[in-house]
Image (tube, rainbow, N blue to C red):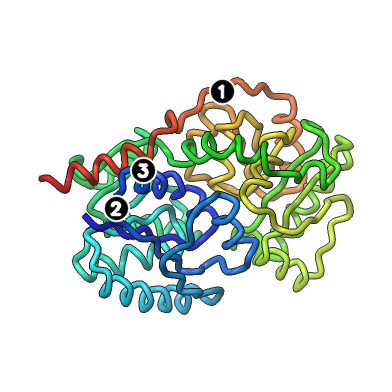
Amino acid sequence: MRIAVVIGTRPEIVKMTPVIRELEARKADFFVLHTGQHYSYEMDQAFFERLELGPARYNLRVGAGTHAGQTARMLVGIEGVLQGEEPDIVLVQGDTNTVLAGALAAVKMHIAVGHVEAGLRSYDRAMPEEINRVLADHCSDYLFAPTEGSKQTLLGEGFPEEIIHVTGNTIVDAVYQHCHLARQKSTAMQDLGLDPGEYVLVTLHRQENVDSATRFTSILEGLDLIAAEHGLPVVYPVHPRSGEMMQRFNLTPARVRLIDPLDFLDFLHLEMNARLVLTDSGGVQEETCILGVPCVTLRDNTERPETLEVGANVLAGTSPWAIAECARMMLNSGRNWPNPYGDGHAAKRIISVLMEARYE
């Protein structure tokens, strides 16, 4: 069985690293195709280097663009690679334009598709990620659900049970594998002059937040309130897209410390030592839950309800006062919730399913 692993963004690189390592350990016939959806050194190549991964065999270097333009360029590039390589299955992960393009290109060529992290739903079609994840599920022959709840969602939508496999989430594998690397390699805390448990960490990049001057302004005001009330540094590594929108809207928060994007190990090091994390990222909601760090999500909904159910996370929306109140609540919360995302062996289960299918 020849397997194509299609990735394109920082979260996909992180979450598929355990899968790639498992394929390497089993000496499987596979290759990595990188669409280049994240195309800067900090958001792309640095991740491969610091995570000690070999380079992708293919990099389409698609870069930014409209959803239609970006997805179209990916479809053309992915199709060309698949025609030459003739894989038996294409693995995609998550909910990006790369995921949609990879799944759609493969299914149109009658190549089996495996969707890692299947069955997540925010039920908000205003989010492009929601459309991508739903369509990817419907293109797939193997649905790798991270939790039993995700499986029940898929069953409720009419998917046959035999194609759904509850594996746990590969982010647990990634966090477990990379925490020691972060401790060994990262100097981010020293470089930034931060002490463990004495700062707040922020990520903010979702289109529905940063492309709206009103929402972006409101969130930054909430972050300023937190910094003023608690006297803690509020550190925000600014995603390139977010930085562009801040310039366009002329936004300059008064009390938030803006820094350049971080590679995964530096970010993980800051994340595991933070007092509180505020984010609009689905992956960061998972990571903080696994690491035992309280999280406030700067959205009105989440496709990670497990983090809410165990008490690791709370939805704040984008009102400054709601953000400040939720931060106050989570700063005073405990950290002893159970990890709902598995035991760190998701990648082994995923590849085992594919290897067993080879003999059917």
What residue would you read off at disc 2?
114
Badge 1 element: loop
Where is residue 11 drawn, in percent x and y?
A: 52, 53
In percent of the image, x 31 and y 67: which residue is there?
104
- The local crowd at label 1, few if under 14, some if 14 to 19, many if 20 or more residues have their Cα within 10 Å, is some
Identity, as a three-letter code, of the amino acid under mark 2:
Gly
Residue nearer the viewer, 267 or 203 = 267
Which label sits in the foreground, 3 or 1? 3
Which quarter shows the C terminus? top left
How many marks the image carries: the answer is 3
Query: In this rendering, would 338 be left or right of 215?
Result: left
Please tell me which of labels 2 and 3 falls first in the chain: 3
Where is residue 112 drawn, in percent x and y?
A: 22, 58
- Residue 25: give its label: 3
Query: In this rendering, would 252 be left or right of 304?
Result: right
Residue 89 visible within the image: yes
- Residue 156: give its label: none
Residue nearer the viewer, 264 or 335 = 264
Which quarter shows the N terminus? bottom left
Which label sits in the foreground, 2 or 3? 3
In percent of the image, x 83 and y 51: which residue is there?
256
Badge 3 element: helix
**Mark 1 vs mark 2, CA separation in Å:** 31 Å
Residue nearer the viewer, 21 or 81 = 21
Identity, as a three-letter code, of the amino acid under mark 3:
Ala
Where is residue 108 drawn, in percent x and y?
A: 23, 70
Query: In this rendering, would 274 be left or right of 299?
Result: right
